[in-house]
Image (cartoon, helix red, strand yellow):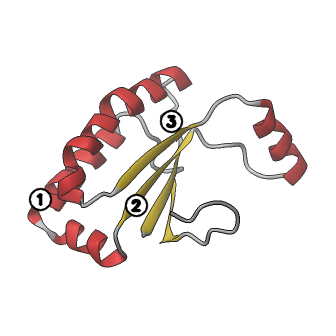
Amino acid sequence: MFKMSFAVYRRPDLTQEQFLAHWRDVHAPLAVKYAKDLRIKRYVQLHGGDYPAAALMTASRNCQPPHDGVVEIWWESEAERLAASASPEGQAAGRVMHADELNFCDMSRATICFGYEHVVIGDAS
């Protein structure tokens, strides 16, 4: 399956709790509502938090501070994702989703990666 990972940061005027509440309680239901139009097969939110492991990894790897969360979305194939984004229904759904993202995400800091998973350990299904 084709996958997108989208690392997101909250808007600076929102607390972590406000960001996560909007993402979970407002945005996630929109993803459910528009899943068929967007041809989404799986949608997962990884809610970041102030975990000791994040601080330790950041310090030990000398990397950027952690983002506030990651959304992962799967499609049957890249062609399916492209077809969804080209359809009138998919375009309308995409506009709604993006407009809502601006309510809680700092898009200037977000990063996106598309590709196919290469499972090294674990079940590939």
Residue 10, label in figure: 3
Considering the numbered disc 2 on the image, is that residue within a helix, a strand or a loop? strand
| 100 to the left or right of 17 | left
* Residue type for callout 3: Arg
Q: Please state the horizontal and vertical placement of residue 99, each as a whole percent of the image.
A: 26, 44
Report crowding for label 3: few under 14, some 14 to 19, many 20 or more residues within 10 A (C-alpha): many
| 106 to the left or right of 58 | left
Q: Please state the horizontal and vertical placement of residue 47, each as a whole percent of the image.
A: 55, 35
**As drawn, which residue projects farthest toward the left?**
88
Q: Of residues 31 and 118, which is closer to you in this image?
A: 118
Total numbered labels:
3
Q: Quadrant of residue 4?
A: bottom left
Q: Which of marks 2 and 3 is nearer the N terminus?
A: 3
Q: Which residue is identified by label 2?
A: 74
Q: Quadrant of residue 1?
A: bottom left
Residue placed at 39% from the left, 49% from the top?
43
Considering the numbered disc 3 on the image, is that residue within a helix, a strand or a loop? loop
Q: Which residue is identified by label 1?
A: 89
Is 83 located above or below residue 91 in the figure? below
